[in-house]
Image (cartoon, rainbow, N blue to C red):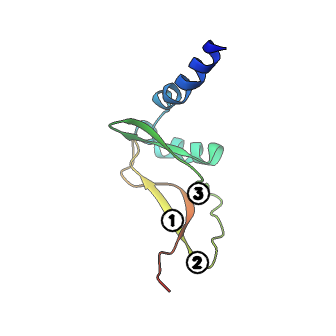
Amino acid sequence: MKALFFLAVLLPSSYAAAAVTVDQLTCAQAAHQVSREGRYYLSTRDGAIPIYNVASVDSPPSCGTRQILYYHIVQTRDNAQCLVGYSCRGSGGGN
């Protein structure tokens, strides 16, 4: 039982460390990862962080009336401004 708990505690951090970040991928590979998994990983000094709920470039989401379409543009190995997907965000308007 202790071994399972120990494994469960270590799994998330070791998984993030093993994640391939978009700066290691080509633009096409990063876009394919988003279409396959609905997420991508950004590299930070603290390790890889996942960016979730990203729709693929091929099928942008239909955003609600108080939302705007957000373009996920990242730097990849071969492209400084690679569009990997879209998501909907709150418009941030006060009205």
Dividing the picture into quadrants, the one containing residue 33 is top right
Compared with residue 63, is residue 53 higher up or lower down, i.e. above or below? above
Circle on res. 66: 2
Mark 2–mark 3 Cα distance, whole angstroms, equals: 22 Å
Question: Looking at the picture, which amino acid does disc 1 mark?
Answer: Tyr
Image spot of residue 11 (x, y percent): 56, 25
Q: Position of residue 27 (x, y in %)?
A: 47, 46
Mark 3 nearby-residue class (10 Å; few <14, some 14–19, many ≥20): some
User: Which amino acid is tagged 3?
Assistant: Val
Q: Quadrant of the N terminus?
A: top right
Q: Is residue 81 above or below residue 61?
A: above
> Which numbered tag is attached to residue 36?
none
Q: Secondary structure at mark 1?
A: strand
Above/below status of 36 relative to 70? above
Where is mark 3, residue-wise?
Answer: 57
Ranked by sequence position, the earlier of labels 3 and 1 is 3
Residue type at the position of mark 2: Arg
Q: Which residue is at the front of the view, 26 or 15?
A: 15
Residue that mark 1 sits on: 70
Distance CA(mark 3)–CA(mark 1): 12 Å
